[in-house]
Image (cartoon, grey):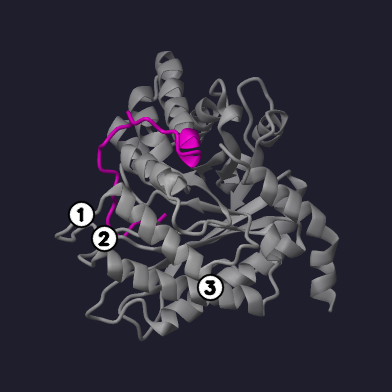
């Protein structure tokens, strides 16, 4: 009873936050790379992974002219919540003035589940309520938790155990977030590693999403105040047959329409190592799809697919900031257009895939 009352306190606010994030033409910038992962992004451009460089790079993104025309939410890593622009303005406050909502990554990474084929579960439930309350006090209004599942048809992955374990973690996380006023982004990522077909990805993802929704129901998660961040349905990266944007759009929306309740206001796809151009084209094809029901707003929550060209243009140099911001805004605008089915093309086709991606 107590738990439902806590959610009750925030119900209107959670709904309003979720709606504000999932508004047509807008998407989420995932800038929540952990300290280790941002190091991997900096290494190829020879930028040292230090706090001042991380702060400078996030400032470059957040202060890009016109960001507020395309981005409705930014996911941060904990360190970034307390950082400021060079003029001394807290990032959360700075974004709020642009009508952009701050989110926070709250999971603590993955560990292998014993007795499985190296399948993983996500950590981070300990003291999560306290952390959520603290993040809310600092101005965050949504959160993200990534669960990772893999497809290996021969080894029967994703196993029922891995699905149950990850669904339970996502649902507990979502419930705790809502008790503390944060809209949970529920992220069940079915990895694209492997040789599986698009049909096999659809089948595995359907099982995963159904398991996640069942757990959300069991935990009494308020769906109108939550968002989903799934993978797109694609063939495995090492699959013999590739798929067109149209095929990916069809299988993705069909899988979602079979499993995700219409009560969820927004579905914000992860880019999962697709090239910048693929991530935009696939989203655009979904917006144009007419013969499958789409009761939710379909959008993006991209990390690499919004930042790859931007990082390359920046190279850690002050004099490149403007050029880097132009690259970032060009991707933000392209994906904004894609959510409306109006994307004309022009993004980089460089493969951004990282095998067994962890962060």
Label pair 1/2, CB-CB below 8 angstroms = yes
**Is 63 situated above or below 263?**
above
For marks 3 and 1, the one nearer the N-term is 3
Magenta range? 335-359
Q: Position of residue 271 (x, y in %)?
A: 40, 48
- Could one spot residue 1 in this view of the protein? yes
User: What residue is drawn where x is 25% and y is 37%?
Assistant: 350
For marks 1 and 2, the one nearer the N-term is 2
For marks 2 and 3, the one nearer the N-term is 3
In the structure shown, which secondary structural element does the residue marked by tag 1 occupy? loop
Q: Position of residue 285 (x, y in %)?
A: 39, 45
Alpha-carbon neighbours of circle 2 within 10 Å: few (<14), some, or many (≥20)?
A: many
**Is 98 situated above or below 128?**
above
Disc 3/disc 1 C-alpha distance (Å): 28 Å
Using residue 292 as the reference point, say whether residue 193 is left or right of it.
left
Residue on which the image places disc 3: 212
Which quadrant is the C terminus positioned in?
A: bottom left
User: What residue is drawn where x is 32% and y is 42%?
Assistant: 278
For this orientation, the residue located farthest to the top is 319
User: What residue is drawn where x is 35% and y is 30%?
Assistant: 309
Q: Position of residue 32 (x, y in %)?
A: 51, 46
Disc 2/disc 3 C-alpha distance (Å): 22 Å
* Disc ID at residue 242: 1
**Is 234 situated above or below 217?**
above
> Is residue 126 one of those drawn in magenta?
no
Label pair 3/1, CB-CB below 8 angstroms = no
As rendered, which of 40 and 196 lies closer to the eye? 196
Q: Main secondary structure of the magenta part?
A: loop
Residue on which the image places disc 2: 235
In the structure shown, which secondary structural element does the residue marked by tag 3 occupy? helix
């Amino acid at each position: 009873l107590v738990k439902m009352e806590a959610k009750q306190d925030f119900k209107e606010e959670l709904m309003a936050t979720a709606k504000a994030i999932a508004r047509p033409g807008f998407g989420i910038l995932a800038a929540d790379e952990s300290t280790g992962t941002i190091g991997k992004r900096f290494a190829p451009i020879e930028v040292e992974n230090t706090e001042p460089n991380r702060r400078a790079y996030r400032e470059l993104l957040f202060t890009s002219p016109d960001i507020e025309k395309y981005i409705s939410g930014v996911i941060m890593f904990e360190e970034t919540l307390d950082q400021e622009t060079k003029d001394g303005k807290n990032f959360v406050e700075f974004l709020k003035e642009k009508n952009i909502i701050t989110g926070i990554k709250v999971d603590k990474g993955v560990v292998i589940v014993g007795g499985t084929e190296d399948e993983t579960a996500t950590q981070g439930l300990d003291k999560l309520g306290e952390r959520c309350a603290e993040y809310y006090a600092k101005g965050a209004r949504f959160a993200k938790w990534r669960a990772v599942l893999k497809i290996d048809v021969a080894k029967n992955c994703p196993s029922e155990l891995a699905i149950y374990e990850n669904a339970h973690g996502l649902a507990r996380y979502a419930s705790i977030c809502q008790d503390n006023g944060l809209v949970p982004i529920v992220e069940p990522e079915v990895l694209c590693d492997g040789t599986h077909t698009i049909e096999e990805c659809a089948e595995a993802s359907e099982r995963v999403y159904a398991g996640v929704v069942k757990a959300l129901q069991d935990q009494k998660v308020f769906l109108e105040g939550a968002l989903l961040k799934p993978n797109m349905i694609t063939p495995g990266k090492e699959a013999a047959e590739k798929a067109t944007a149209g095929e990916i759009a069809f299988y993705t929306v069909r899988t979602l329409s079979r499993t995700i309740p219409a009560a969820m206001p927004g579905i914000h796809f992860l880019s999962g190592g697709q090239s910048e151009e693929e991530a935009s084209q696939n989203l655009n094809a979904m917006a144009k799809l007419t013969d499958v029901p789409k009761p939710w707003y379909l959008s993006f929550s991209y990390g690499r697919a919004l930042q790859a060209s931007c990082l390359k243009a920046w190279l850690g140099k002050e004099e490149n900031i403007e050029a880097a911001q132009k690259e970032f805004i060009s991707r933000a605008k392209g994906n904004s257009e894609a959510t409306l089915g109006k994307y004309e093309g022009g993004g980089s086709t460089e493969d951004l895939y990282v095998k067994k991606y962890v962060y």
